[in-house]
Each structure stands twice: as structure tokens, then as C-alpha cells.
């Protein structure tokens, strides 16, 4: 019996000699053809790579000029494989850049650690702090908050502010503005900086001095809570008044979740037509966001896109140099660094956890926290400190069509924040293992 490889029917028929010939079904016939073609190709010395199932991780950046051309032109290599292999090569390039950056940051760290921070500056007498503003007076609470939450935006600062300010023994530093900043650090000249500092302190002193409140239980003054999420602002105000025992809290967040949140929450002058002023909040009706676009930004990197270097790059520097400078200016004993993830309702109250650390640092009574510890606010598409998200928060945003960040983007962000993550763990006790271990 003769076997035909070219039949389109799975039946039998007579040949001209009268013998019956068996025909194979089409799928099996095609498979045999592919096998025979592959054997023929190998026999003449042309090497294709059909064994690549998804991404060929054997290809390196150094191989790209030769191997990549052969692979990307191989007939069996699909468009998806081309894309993923190209992304793999780009990731290798980014890893090399991260390793190079790590060396330069270490040198920068060593240089910064040898510098002395002068905790004062020469102020024109007409803008000097008034005597009643200084911390040896009973009025000092009116011009400098007892506890200032200074970082970072989209890391749970609104939730922490509610936890602290809604206690019976505390009150907001400013009656209506939770993020009450002087903006003096944005001054373009020494005189402008001094003017901003003087008038800001004068204004808040007058506001708070006319609204003194006390703890009804022991008649003590209420502890004041501010949420000015600007480390630079906190530093310059501290240098202006030179207080001795004020507390500062910095919240960190997994860098991938952090960048994804900032990307979806705020508009950007480099890509958005509508900026959503004054708060620069994104709007699904006027702005566009997608996991794919977000991924491409990180795939391109800081040297190729203004959007990355102007918006996302500063978070790297602030989370490293900003916190280190704050510690040197105000004293490490006056700075508490914690993970936003430890503030989630299902873990915040555990022994030795977030609330215990917070109480030990601030001196606030552990038993006086309210129901705010179980209600997250200002998250995802529910913007504003007054908006409650319940006891859970998703990473899917309305503006992205309810889609979450791509898994492969997370790894790219970890590569970018690799040096920061190592410093967070070493200097601040903030460890994100997946980020620290992304490069071996």
C-alpha cells in the first residue's frame, strides 16, 4: 500500500494500476512535511531555531548584530517572538546601565556622607523668626507641627494623616489644609526664600494662636499633625526655626506599584493635552493611560524620553538623597521610615507592626487609634483624602479601562530602582526583596 502525503481527504481511492492508496488526514500530512523540511534544511547546513518557544534568552546584547538578524528573519519566528526577544535584549541593556549607575551612585553616596550639613542660614533681620515662634516657648506648636508626614506622594500619606489626625489627643496643624507647605524651597533667590518663610510662619501662627485646643482628658495641648509631602520644604522650615524634637515620617512603597499609581493619578505636561488643573488629576474623559503605554515608557528609559526623566526620575533621587539629607538635618532619631504595605487594614494592627512602631516613635497612646486604621482613603480612582476605598485597594484604574500593570513592567521598574532598593534596605530598613534581587 502506498502512502500519499498530499491528500486533502482522509479516505482511499484506486490508482491507475487498480491498487487502493491510503490518504492521510491533512494535519498529519502537514506535520510530516514540516519534519522532512527541517531535516533537509539541517542537512544543507542552514541553522534555524524553531526550538525557541517564547523568548530566546541565549541571545545577548553582544550577539545582536549577527544572531538577532538571523533569528528575526527565520520564517518560523513569529512577530510575537520578535517583539519579546527585542524586549529581552533591551532589558539586558537596562541591566547593564543599572550596574554602571550603581557604581556611580556609590561614589556619590561616599561624597555626600563626607559633607557637613549646616543646620542654619544667614537670615536678613527683617525676616528673622519672631521670639514667640521659637521652640522654647509655649506657642511653638502653632508654627511648627509636632509630627510632619513628608513623603511620599501616592505612598499612603493621606491614609496615615487620617489615622493620626483623627485621634482625641491630636489635631490637624492647619484647620483645612492637610498638606500645608511653605513652598519656600521653590524661591528663586535668598530674599524670596526668606520672605516666604517669614510670611508663612506669621500666617500659621495667627491662625493657630486664635484656635488653641486642649486634650479634654488631661488638659494638655493637642499634638499637631501636618501632611506636607515635601522633604525639601520640611528641611528648609527646620533650618529656619531650628526645633529640637519635632518628628518626621516617611512612607515608602513598592517602586513598581508606586510608579504605576503616580502615572495613573496625575497628568503630565509632556504627554497630556488637558492637565486637570489645579490638582493635575487625570480624568478618563480627557486623558489617556494604558498598561502598554506605561510599559513602553520604562522600556525606553530615562535617556530617551522626557516624560521619564522629568517625572519619574526625581522619585529615584528623592527617595534616596532626600531622606538621607532629612536624617542629617533633623537627626536620624527624629525620622521614622515605614512601608506603606504595612499599613493595610489586615496587618496594621498586628503586634510589633505598623501601629506599634508609630506609637513608639511619636509617643502617642497605642489604644487611642480609631476606625480609620481599617478604611483606606485617596486610592486608585477615588481621589482626595475624603474619599474612602474601603478596606482593600486594587491596582486597576478606571482610566486604564480597569486593567492592571503588565507583569513584565514590574521587572523593568525594579531594574531602574535596583540601587534605590538596596539603599532603602541598608540605610532605612525598608526592604523589597524582589527589587533588591532583580539583578544577581
Image (cartoon, rainbow, N blue to C red):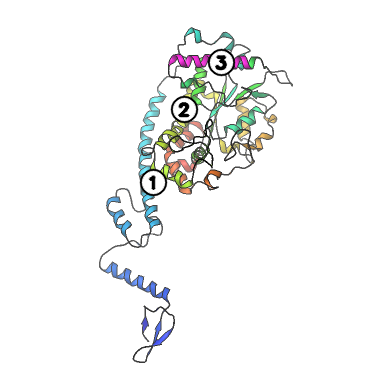
Q: CA distance from mark 1 to mark 2?
A: 28 Å
User: Quadrant of the rendered structure where residue 157 is?
Assistant: top right
| Horizontal relation, residue 413 to residue 35: left or right | right
* Element assignment for label 3: helix
Q: Is residue 222 above or below residue 268?
A: above
For residue 322, the mark is 2
Local packing at callout 3 (Cα closer than 10 Å; few below 14, some 14-19, many 20+) is many
Q: Residue beneath label 3, please?
A: 201
In percent of width and height, residue 90 lies at 36, 46
Q: Which residues are magenta?
A: 189-207
Q: Earlier in the sequence, mark 1 or mark 2?
A: 1
Q: Which mark is residue 106?
A: none
Q: Is residue 5 left or right of residue 219?
A: left
Mark earlier in primary sequence (1, 3): 1
Q: Which residue is mark 1?
A: 91
Q: Nearer the viewer, mark 2 or mark 3?
A: 3
Q: Nearer the viewer, mark 1 or mark 3?
A: 3
Q: Is residue 191 magenta?
A: yes
Q: Quadrant of the C terminus?
A: top left
CA–CA distance between discs 2 and 3?
Answer: 23 Å
Quarter of the view holding residue 210: top right
**Element type where label 2 sits in the image:** helix
Q: How many marks on residues?
A: 3
Amino acid at each position: 500500500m502506498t502512502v500519499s502525503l498530499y491528500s486533502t481527504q482522509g479516505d482511499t481511492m484506486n490508482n491507475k494500476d487498480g491498487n487502493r492508496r491510503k490518504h492521510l488526514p491533512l494535519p498529519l500530512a502537514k506535520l510530516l512535511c514540516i519534519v522532512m523540511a527541517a531535516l533537509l534544511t539541517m542537512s544543507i547546513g542552514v541553522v534555524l531555531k524553531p526550538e525557541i518557544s517564547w523568548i530566546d534568552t541565549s541571545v545577548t546584547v553582544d550577539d545582536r548584530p549577527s544572531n538577532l538578524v538571523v533569528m528575526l528573519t527565520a520564517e518560523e519566528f513569529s512577530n510575537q517572538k520578535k517583539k519579546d526577544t527585542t524586549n529581552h535584549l533591551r532589558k539586558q541593556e537596562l541591566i547593564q546601565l543599572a550596574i554602571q549607575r550603581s557604581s556611580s551612585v556609590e561614589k556619590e553616596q561616599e561624597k555626600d556622607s563626607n559633607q557637613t550639613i549646616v543646620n542654619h542660614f544667614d537670615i536678613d533681620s527683617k525676616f528673622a523668626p519672631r521670639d514667640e515662634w521659637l521652640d522654647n516657648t509655649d506657642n511653638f506648636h502653632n508654627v511648627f507641627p509636632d509630627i510632619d508626614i513628608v513623603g511620599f506622594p501616592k505612598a499612603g500619606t493621606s491614609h496615615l494623616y487620617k489615622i493620626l489626625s483623627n485621634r482625641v489627643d491630636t489635631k490637624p496643624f492647619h484647620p483645612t489644609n492637610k498638606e500645608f507647605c511653605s513652598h519656600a524651597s521653590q524661591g528663586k533667590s535668598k530674599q524670596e526664600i526668606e520672605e516666604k518663610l517669614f510670611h508663612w510662619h506669621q500666617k500659621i501662627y495667627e491662625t493657630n494662636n486664635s484656635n488653641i485646643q486642649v486634650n479634654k482628658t488631661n488638659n494638655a495641648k493637642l499634638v499637631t499633625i501636618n501632611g506636607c509631602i515635601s522633604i525639601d520644604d520640611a528641611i528648609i522650615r527646620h533650618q529656619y526655626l531650628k526645633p529640637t524634637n519635632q518628628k518626621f515620617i516617611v512612607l515608602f512603597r513598592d517602586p513598581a506599584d508606586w510608579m504605576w499609581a503616580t502615572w495613573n493619578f496625575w497628568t503630565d505636561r509632556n504627554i497630556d493635552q488637558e492637565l486637570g488643573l489645579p490638582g493635575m488629576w487625570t480624568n478618563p474623559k480627557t486623558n489617556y493611560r494604558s498598561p502598554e503605554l506605561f510599559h513602553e515608557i520604562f522600556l525606553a528609559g530615562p535617556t530617551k524620553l522626557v516624560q521619564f526623566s522629568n517625572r519619574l526620575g526625581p522619585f529615584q533621587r528623592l527617595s534616596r538623597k532626600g531622606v538621607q539629607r532629612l536624617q542629617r538635618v533633623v537627626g536620624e532619631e527624629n525620622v521614622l521610615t515605614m512601608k506603606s504595605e504595612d499599613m493595610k487594614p489586615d496587618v496594621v494592627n498586628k503586634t510589633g507592626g505598623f501601629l506599634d512602631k508609630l506609637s513608639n516613635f511619636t509617643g502617642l497612646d497605642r489604644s487611642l487609634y480609631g476606625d480609620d486604621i481599617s478604611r483606606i482613603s485617596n486610592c486608585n480612582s477615588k481621589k482626595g483624602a475624603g474619599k474612602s476605598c474601603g478596606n482593600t485597594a486594587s491596582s486597576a484604574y478606571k482610566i486604564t479601562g480597569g486593567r492592571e500593570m503588565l507583569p513584565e513592567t514590574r521587572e523593568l521598574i525594579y531594574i531602574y530602582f535596583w540601587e534605590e532598593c538596596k539603599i532603602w534596605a541598608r540605610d532605612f530598613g525598608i526592604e523589597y526583596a524582589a527589587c533588591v534581587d532583580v539583578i544577581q
